[in-house]
Image (cartoon, coloured by chain):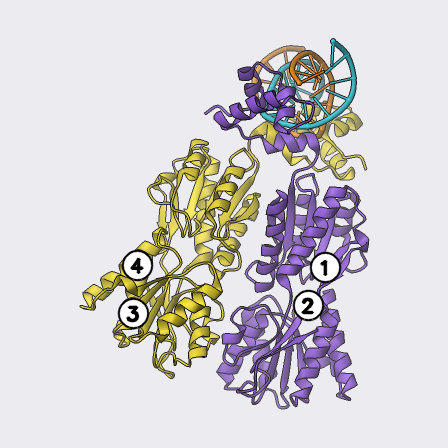
Chain colours: A yellow, B purple, C orange, D cyan
Amino acid sequence: MQTVTIKILAEKLKLSRSTVSKALSDSHEISQDTKKRVLAMAAKLDYAPNPYASSLRKKSSKTIAVVIPEVADSFFAQAINGIEAVAQDKGYHVLIYLTHENFLREKAIVKDIQNGRIDGVLMSLSSETTSYAHLHALFKKELPIVFFDRVCPGINAATVTTNDYAASYRATQHLIDCGCKKIVFLAISKSLLITGERLKGYQQALADNALPFYPADILVCKNDTAYNNSLITKLLTKPNRPDGLLSSVEKLATSIYTVCNQLQIAIPGQLKVVCFSNLQTAPLLHPPLTTITQPAFAMGKTAATILFKALKKGTIDLPNNTVVIPSVMLVRNSTSAIGTPFMEVQL
Amino acid sequence: MQTVTIKILAEKLKLSRSTVSKALSDSHEISQDTKKRVLAMAAKLDYAPNPYASSLRKKSSKTIAVVIPEVADSFFAQAINGIEAVAQDKGYHVLIYLTHENFLREKAIVKDIQNGRIDGVLMSLSSETTSYAHLHALFKKELPIVFFDRVCPGINAATVTTNDYAASYRATQHLIDCGCKKIVFLAISKSLLITGERLKGYQQALADNALPFYPADILVCKNDTAYNNSLITKLLTKPNRPDGLLSSVEKLATSIYTVCNQLQIAIPGQLKVVCFSNLQTAPLLHPPLTTITQPAFAMGKTAATILFKALKKGTIDLPNNTVVIPSVMLVRNSTSAIGTPFMEVQL
DNA sequence: GTGAAAGCGCTAACAT
DNA sequence: ATGTTAGCGCTTTCAC
């Protein structure tokens, strides 16, 4: 099947290619009459412009890349929804790349997108990332980039985050208010900036309540459920086990609940749990899970909006865009006895 | 910053562009020595080939589109993982398009991708889709397309599905075995082929057990949680309410549980529930949810593999590829009293 | 084994 | 208001 090009349209219409091209892009220097004829013929022949020819010429692809660790994670799934909504609205296409928390993959992906394929990047770092040279290469290429959630430290880029420090502080305070004396902090990485923020909030809350902080009370998990389950099992079977858990990672909630089921540890009776999580099913778990819920959709939407704004202006003065959208704490029965009413705490 | 092109490499190396191009693609007609020199210079100048120039010339973009209703849904999130794994392995890029169950969006997306932007499509229909003309247009363009899960009826394309009929039959039989006399079937659409299959399985199981089937026992929900909740509330407050629910849609599980909590209806005591669902938290709900779990990752992976096979061969004899990967039923306490052991039923 | 030349389909200067 | 020309960066004959 012969593909219909501008050249063919031009021949059928006995016009030049440039006239047809201009007519199709509704240029003011083309007469209304000609525009109508061109559009009619284009419709008749089902003409569809070749995006790559156009991209090559214009050096812009109307495509952005979204580089994230996972898609099977409520936060990122909701963030993608926000991003895609804006992209569709602006007529942009969205390329998805998953790092699976793997630094080498992240490097390969970053390498793969710095060649004109995309006009801009939305990115959330992998938990393994500790070196940022591959990202500086993106800057050299003057590719607009907006980090969201897991931002890149020491780099002059736009960022969209939530108030991790305050959220973590508040969650820890909540656990203490509920009577916890020994709270363990669960993380998936030591290097992520958000982990650091959340950790600081946790530590400060401990300090402000005159509770001791032990480095051993930070449990660093991996991207491996079996491993995490055994780690948590070990934690909950040792002599002076914690009476409170603050998980900075959504997927660890599943591990915590699973292990507690196995060990017959009662939540919240013997162990109180708060988790940074956007799980839709948090209210339906047994017991309902107290969460710090991030504005995932809004964060995705905002990050995309900032990126498109930069793309439109053509300048890359993104550095000054650092948006912080607050999370909420949703208090449910994993921290308070059954019967205690649900409570929403703004942060 | 000056972008490094083949032309520049050629000048620096005092070679012709074609020689450089061939060297870069490891052509056998170039000497080892030259190849080394070219590669070294390319590395030194951080050369990255322009993908759109290449696509334009080769008429192939190393990019596929994934068109799905949602991403914030365990099934699709897991399927994307499978797809992305294969794509990354084959060096392909993945464009994501979300229809949000909206037919007009689906049409717009399909229109938008039939212009050479992509080499192939993986697709799952929106629940609103009842006309298929927009898809036939894709075939006309000879774009390889593989449907997964929500396939297109009456079209000669490759499909990857699960055994929906058998799964639904088995789930209904299970509810009957558990003592249910009046089972309501929940769906999100009347038009989807999978809904039809699941409905048939449900009806046949009723018939085989000499239970009557009432058309009113099919509850058609929407892509709107508030609406669904009120619909389910109505269902569960009417005089002769059902004692069993078979939901063919994952997200309805949340609605069912939420409403039952509000109405204080005991699961499984007063109502037994089975849901087609890939929720990770199904075992942790209150009570743990009996699910028909689809092989989402495998389905995505298989669909992608079939597509890449067709892409490689260049021919489009996809029609004969109709793969069916079986689901499993995971029996938990939403259908059986607490204490009954977990059970996995192959289908 | 290397090079010259053409062209993928489009757009943007620059005429007319 | 329309046409001519050149070229985006790459690959692919075809010649040497």
Residues at discs 1 and 2 in contact (Cβ within 8 Å): no
Residues at discs 1 and 4 in contact (Cβ within 8 Å): no
- Whether residue A272 is visible, yes or no, is yes
Foreground pick, B54 / A133? A133
Kindly identify the residue that appears in the image at 25 percent across and 74 percent down.
A181
Residues at discs 3 and 1 in contact (Cβ within 8 Å): no
Q: Amino acid at mark 2?
A: Ser
Q: Which residue is mark 3?
A: A183
Residues at discs 2 and 3 in contact (Cβ within 8 Å): no
Residue B189 image offset from top left, x and y in percent = 68, 68
In the rendered structure, find residue B189 and report the number of the disc placed on it. Answer: 2
In the rendered structure, find residue B160 and report the number of the disc placed on it. Answer: 1
Foreground pick, A24 / A278? A278
Q: Amino acid at mark 3?
A: Ile
Q: Chain of mark 2?
A: B
Q: CA distance from mark 1 to mark 4?
A: 45 Å
- Whether residue A54 is visible, yes or no, is no
Sequence-earlier tag: 3 or 4: 3
Residues at discs 3 and 4 in contact (Cβ within 8 Å): no
Kindly identify the residue that appears in the image at 70 percent across and 24 percent down.
A17
Q: CA distance from mark 1 to mark 2?
A: 20 Å
In the rendered structure, find residue B298 and report the number of the disc placed on it. Answer: none
Q: Amino acid at mark 4?
A: Leu
Kindly identify the residue that appears in the image at 34 percent across and 70 percent down.
A245
Q: Which residue is mark 4?
A: A199
Residue A345 image offset from top left, x and y in percent = 33, 68
Q: Chain of mark 1?
A: B
